[in-house]
Image (cartoon, rainbow, N blue to C red):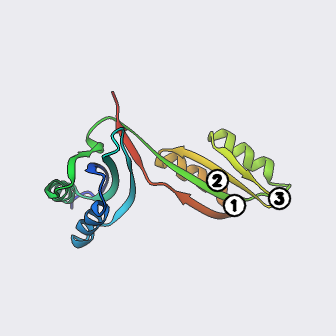
């Protein structure tokens, strides 16, 4: 049985209308699910970087890379699990915070180096960045307090060195 793993694919693309739609269609047409997608300009405003998380075996990864490289607007494709890299995701989470629980939630935020970005009588909004394991642990600790809303940016990655 082949192993299904999480792959971080980074595609440098021309910053033009329709590029994202063509890449999303490519994945959908082949039945590949995108777990996460982050897109933004690079240091060159004419070029964007798409960071795509997809799960599958090496055969699926190979097919995804080949298909991406066939698209005219794709400049270069990288797969980060093969190189030493840094990856981050950003979460904003709104959690119930009463007078009794507020101090506990603030303590959890400090331990995880999360920032408090909004305070109200009933809620705290926290911002945290990190890798998947850190974010999952943080969310699991907040769940008992009552998460009202959670928003994620999607993973971004860069090679070390």
Q: Position of residue 58 (x, y in %)?
A: 20, 54
Label 1 to label 3: alpha-carbon separation = 18 Å
Identified at 20% across, 58% down, the residue is 64
Q: Is residue 155 found left or right of 108 in the rendered image?
A: left
Q: Quadrant of the N terminus?
A: bottom left
Q: Residues within 10 Å of mark 3 (few under 14, many from 20)?
A: few
Under circle 2, the secondary element is helix
Identified at 60% across, 54% down, the residue is 92
Identify the residue under disc 2: 141
Position above or below: 4 against 77 = below
Under circle 1, the secondary element is helix
Q: Which mark is residue 144?
A: 1
Q: Is residue 62 found left or right of 103 in the rendered image?
A: left
| Residue 111: quadrant of the picture | top right
Q: Residues within 10 Å of mark 2 (few under 14, many from 20)?
A: few
Marks 1 and 2: CB-CB under 8 Å?
yes
Return the disc, 1 or 3, that comes first in the chain's sequence. Answer: 3
Q: Position of residue 105 (x, y in %)?
A: 73, 50
Q: Position of residue 96 (x, y in %)?
A: 74, 61
Q: Is residue 143 found left or right of 7 in the rendered image?
A: right
């Amino acid at each position: 049985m082949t192993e299904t793993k999480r792959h971080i694919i980074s595609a440098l693309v021309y910053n033009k209308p329709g590029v994202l739609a063509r890449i999303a269609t490519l994945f959908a047409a082949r039945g590949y699910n995108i777990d996460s997608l982050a897109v933004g300009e690079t240091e060159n405003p004419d070029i964007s970087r798409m960071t795509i998380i997809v799960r599958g075996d090496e055969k699926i990864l190979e097919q995804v890379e080949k298909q991406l490289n066939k698209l005219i607007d794709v400049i270069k494709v990288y797969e980060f699990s093969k190189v030493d890299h840094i990856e981050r995701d950003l979460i904003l989470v709104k959690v119930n915070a009463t007078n009794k629980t507020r101090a506990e939630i603030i303590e959890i935020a400090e331990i995880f180096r999360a920032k408090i970005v909004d305070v109200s009588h009933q809620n705290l909004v926290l911002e945290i960045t990190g890798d998947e394991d850190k974010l999952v642990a943080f969310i699991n600790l907040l769940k008992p307090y009552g998460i009202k809303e959670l928003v994620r940016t999607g993973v971004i990655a860069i090679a070390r060195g």
